[in-house]
Amino acid sequence: MARRHRTLPRSRVIAAVVITVVVLVAAVGAYGTFVLMRTPNDHVTSADAVVVLGGEHDGREDFGVKLAKKLHASTVVLSNPYGPKDKVMKRLCDTTQGDVQVICEKPEPSTTRGEAMFTDRLAAEHHWRHIVVVSWRYHLIRARFIFDQCAAPSGASFSFVAVPRRYPQTVAQFSYIFAYQVGGTIKALIQGECDR
């Protein structure tokens, strides 16, 4: 005699799917709020150089120069994937700001990975022992992971500091930022360490 399979009522399946989605969205939101938005700055008192990662011109370049002066760093390296007509970079690149030399470097590839690679090269060339990396707060966790993968051979140590700015966003914008950072971290995991 064939055994009859009992199926769940359709309403229970729909309720289970809805509950799963709500729990997932709440978990992602909590992670984003408590991890990405509250990533602390490293405590820094001095540095040989400050490296400012590319992104939107949100004041990070000028903040990097001010931070270098405060930390008595000799050099600021600005990631410059923007092209020759970018006004912010034209104003700052290859100049001296007080006692701080400003170097602009195009990352190859034009990603955080490329920025970590040129930082590793410059650290070895200039014998920098401690470097402060500046980016926006949401990027700090992923940047730290990628620098650990790609900028260790120079022997320099790194501290990470966020641009001191608030970024008002809608839920949709924050969801995109979160997904982008998680996707970038997964990509970095798959890529592994940089080729030496």
Image (spheres, rainbow, N blue to C red):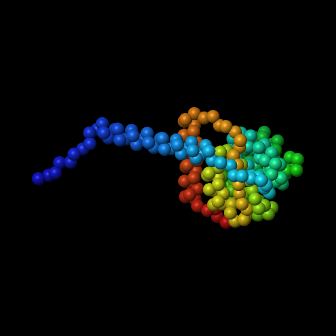
Q: Position of residue 37 (x, y in %)?
A: 61, 43
Question: How many numbered marks appear?
Answer: 0
Using the rendered view, name the quadrant where residue 151 is placed: bottom right
Quadrant where the C terminus is found in the figure: bottom right
Q: Position of residue 30 (x, y in %)?
A: 52, 43
The residue lying furthest to the left in this view is 1
User: In the image, 175: left or right of 54?
Assistant: left
**Residue at 69% across, 46% down:** 162
**Residue 28 vertical placement versus 157 (above, below):** above
Using the rendered view, name the quadrant where residue 48 is placed: bottom right
Residue 105 shows up from this direction: no
The residue lying furthest to the right in this view is 98
Pick whichever, 66 or 90, lies toward us: 66
**Residue at 78% across, 39% down:** 87
**Residue at 57% across, 39% down:** 174
Q: Position of residue 152 (x, y in %)?
A: 68, 63
Pick whichever, 187 or 168, lies toward us: 168
User: In the image, 58: left or right of 26?
Assistant: right
